[in-house]
Amino acid sequence: MRSLCKVQAGVIYTEEEVEHSVRIVLANVESSLSKGSFAWGEPPDMEVWSAPLYDYKSLRGLSTSRNQFLKDKLSMAAPVASPTFPALSVESYTGSLPTLEELKVFLEESRTTQDNWVNIKSMSARSILKANLNRNNVKSNVTLTVDNGGNVEDITPNAGSTGRKIMDSMFASESSLQVRGGTDLTLDALAAYLKYLEGTGKANWQELHDKVRFAETRDGASFYTLFGAAIQLGVISRRRVYHETIQYERDRNAGFLSPFGYSTPTVTSAVDAICSLEWYRLLALKSQVCIEATYPLNFWRWKGYLIQYTSVGREGPAVLLVHGFGASLQHFRDNIGSIADEGHRVWAITLLGFGRSEKPNVDYSELLWSELLRDFIVDVVREPVHLVGNSIGGYICAIAAGLWPSLANSLILLNSAGSVVPSYSFIPLSKEGRTLWLSGLQARLLLLFLRSRAGGILKEYYPTRTERVDKPLVDEIIRASYDPGAKTVIESIFNFNLSIPLNFLFDSFGGEILVIQGMKDPLTKSESFVSMLREHCSNVHIRELDAGHAPHDEVPDEVNSVLCEWMKMKETELKSALEKSSAI
């Protein structure tokens, strides 16, 4: 505020934001300004600055169907030259930049109790799983590297290291895979990336070319790995990347753009990544001006990706709802409000790769999604939750509870994926690697099939109430199937590894578990599954319902009643335990 007074600012410009927490900060700043007193008169105005890739008139008029959006053929906006600001004739002491040590001291002193949870995020799900296997003397197909203290190390090789120091390097370190520096350096790095197939005599360009090979874990994945951070930080705009990339393609082909695709993999990778980033940003922005649900739809950035979520209820214990494969948080349409009305704060998340959350070009796995849940609980909810998951979402919840027990007050599974393995002595873990080309072909065919049969397939999963498979449910699933990256998510089906036994995860969690099982599930032999749970799992309570694979949506009233009854009982037990511990 003091700086505003010195320069007598009339307008404050801010970029259009989609992340909920940042929008809250901007709203608070605007509110504070409106209440402030300024010697020169009226408070400064807040002007929102936006630089969309597509030239559109109104967000409300944009289609949320990617298929229809492409048919509309909107023109691309050209990049704008950076403005030159006049020098201020005001003497203002800007201070000095704090040192790294001063920042560390500040962060340590300002850390709250909840911030101690940040340490939970310091180790990957894979490493914790390896440690648990090692602790329980369970063999696996992976090598367990143990340090002198008996801990399993999360050793990641310096995949990006070229083994030599490069003058004028475009990277912060030899092992880094992220381009760092200002706009000019990033533009030079982009030029080097686009000309990957042409070779180079420049040492720093050759370094980038070497790193492209490390970053290309999937076809087209290298662009975002190298330039994602620079784009998110605004070092280089999506407009500029698109313009430079298309200009290079034209120069390479005598001014011609082929309707059959681009001439190099790097051009394809850059254009696909930029258009994908812009699409999900538009979806998020549109959700802020077009309210399509009975609850607020917010967005949170996880590792740079936009994740959709909602939060309903102002008091009571926290509940986190996690959907199954192909669905989104809207699958809990008749659970969110009802559970909140019973005195709970309800959170529901759309997992990375589904619904209106971003679908980046990454390797999707159960462990990746479990880390997403962990970070969401730590960074957004900021307290332990009752974890509720359906289908693959239930399996992911079980992994999260098993690897980070302190994050879950209880675990509730709704027709969960996964299996019970008696007397497990060997647990194979999936190996990270490139996806086979056959998976891509299978994914394309499966997408075509699902789009044509979505309604009929869903009705098989709702055997007692097929009328619940309504148009909004089917339309959203089909809409999401056209989103950029949908095929990549479908590919993950062919690489899923549900080999971690549920009873191993339950034992690792150590808490109470409720299993709500629709006994007419066409995907699961429910009678056998329930029998195995009763025989081999302790601390598991089972409720059998006359429903299919998605009981929470097929018979929501029954499920809501069971959930609320369970959570009320667990909260009473937790309160009693806390009172006893404080009395000791």
Image (tube, rainbow, N blue to C red):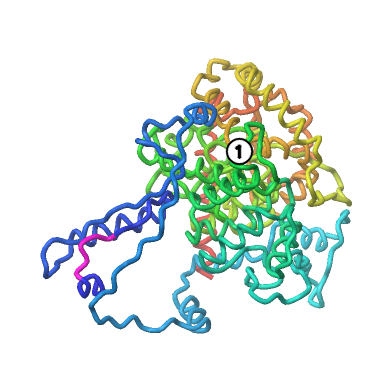
* Residue 5 image point, x, y percent: 20, 72
Please tell me whether the stretch drawn in magenta is mainly helix, strand or loop. Answer: loop
Along the line of sight, the residue nearer the viewer: 443 or 136: 443
Residue drawn at x 86%, y 48% is 424
Please, what secondary structure does the residue beneath circle 1 have?
loop
Horizontal side of 27 relative to 156 (left or right) equals left
- The image shows residue 433, relative to residue 3, as above or below, that is above
Query: Would you say residue 136 sits in the magenta stretch?
Result: no
- The image shows residue 63, relative to residue 576, as above or below, that is above
Residue drawn at x 42%, y 32% is 62
* Residue 274 image point, x, y percent: 55, 46
Q: Amino acid at mark 1?
A: Phe
Residue drawn at x 29%, y 58% is 28
Q: Quadrant of residue 188?
A: bottom right
Q: Which residue is mark 1?
A: 256
Q: Quadrant of residue 486?
A: top right
Along the line of sight, the residue nearer the viewer: 77 or 351: 77
Q: Is residue 87 visible?
A: yes
- The quarter of the picture where the N terminus appears is bottom left
- The image shows residue 504, relative to residue 558, as above or below, that is below
* Residue 557 image point, x, y percent: 49, 27
Q: Quadrant of residue 133?
A: bottom right
* Residue 296 image point, x, y percent: 40, 40
Magenta residues, as a range?
Answer: 8-12
Q: Is residue 510 visible?
A: no
Assess disc 1: are there few (<14), some (14-19) or many (≥20) residues with their C-alpha within 10 Å of its C-alpha: few
Along the line of sight, the residue nearer the viewer: 361 or 128: 361
